[in-house]
Image (cartoon, rainbow, N blue to C red):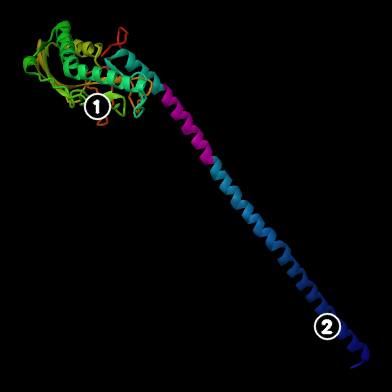
Amino acid sequence: MTKEKKFKIWLGVIWGLGTLLLIGIGAAWAMLLMKPENENLAKINDELAALKTTAQGLAAARQALAEAEAREVNVNKQLAFFRNRYRSLDYRNWKPGDATPTNLAYQEAIWREQMREFSYDYGPRLMGELLGAAQSSGVTLTGWNDLKIAVQDPPKGPEDLSIPPNGFYRPTGGALPVEIVGNLDQIQAFFKKIHQGQILMTVGSSLKLSGSSPRITATFSVQPYLVAKGDNVVLSAVAAPAAGAAGAAAAPASGAPAGSGSPPTSTGTPGP
C-alpha cells in the first residue's frame, strides 16, 4: 500500500472521527441548552393551565357573588315587608350579651312585651283572625270551640331572652288543624282573608275537600308566625309570597314560612 493511499485512509478516518465528535458535541450542547428550555416551557405551560383554571374559578365565584348579592337584596325587601306587614315582636336596638344599663333596660322591656304577647295577646288575636275570616267569607268554622290555641311559654326571665335564628317565632309550636264548611267561592275567600290579616300564616299542603257545593268541607292545617324585627334581627331565608293559600307548601322545619299568601290590600305596622 502506497503512502498516498495510507494518507487518504487516515484522512478519511480522521474526518469521520471529527464528524462524529462534532455531532456528539452538538448533541451534548443541545441537551445542555434545550433540556432546561423544554423543562422551563413545560413549567410555564403548567402554570398557564393553573392560571386558566383559577381564572375560571374566579369567574364562577364572581357570578356566585353577584347572585348571592341579588338574593340578599330580595331577602331584605321581603324581610322589610314581613316586619311592617304582619304582627311582630320588636327587639329594637337590643344587643345580646351587652351588660350596659341601657341595653339591660331594653332587654327587660322586650321580655315584658314577649311575656304579654305569649301569655295574653297572641292566642286571642289568632282566634279573632280565624273567626273574622270565617265570618267575612261566609264559611262555618266547625268545632272552633274545641280548637285549642296553646301558645308556647315565654322566657322565664330577661336573661333567657333570645332572638329566633331565622327571624320567625312559631308561637303555637306546630300547625293548627282547621275545618271549614261552605261553597267553593266561600272557601277561597276564607283563604284569601286569612292571608290579608295581621298574623302571618301558611296553609299546609294536606288540604282535603269532601262533600258537594254548597256544603263542601275543607280540612287543612295552618301554621301561624310571629315576626321578630329590630336592627340586629337577621332573616336567614324566606321564600317569596305565594300566589294563594290553597295548596301552599307546608312551612319548612327551620321555621321560615314557605309563603305569605296573596299580597295584602293594606299596609301598616302591627304591634305586638
Q: Where does the magenta region start and end?
A: 56-73
128 over 154 or under it: above or below: above
Residue for badge 1: 251
Q: Measuring from the top left, give residue 269's x and y in whole percent.
A: 31, 10
175 over 6 or under it: above or below: above
Q: In percent of the image, x 88 and y 82: which residue is there? A: 11
Q: Secondary structure at mark 2?
A: helix
Q: Which disc number belongs to residue 94? A: none
For the C terminus, the image quarter is top left
> Which of disc 2 and disc 1 is earlier in sequence?
2
Q: Measuring from the top left, give residue 18's x and y in whole percent.
A: 82, 77
Q: Secondary structure at mark 1?
A: loop
The answer to which of 18 and 186 lies nearer the viewer is 186
Q: Is residue 63 magenta?
A: yes
Q: Amino acid at mark 1?
A: Ala
Q: In percent of the image, x 64 and y 52: which residue is there? A: 44
Residue for badge 2: 13
Q: Is residue 182 magenta?
A: no
Q: Measuring from the top left, give residue 34's x and y in whole percent.
A: 71, 62
Q: Amino acid at mark 2?
A: Val
Is the residue under label 2 in contact with that under label 1 (CB below 8 Å)? no
The answer to which image quadrant residue 208 occupies is: top left
The answer to which of 123 and 41 lies nearer the viewer is 123
For the N terminus, the image quarter is bottom right
Q: Is residue 52 left or right of residue 13?
A: left
Q: In percent of the image, x 38 and y 21: which residue is there? A: 231
Q: Is residue 211 left or right of residue 169?
A: left
Q: Measuring from the top left, give residue 104's x and y in whole percent.
A: 32, 23
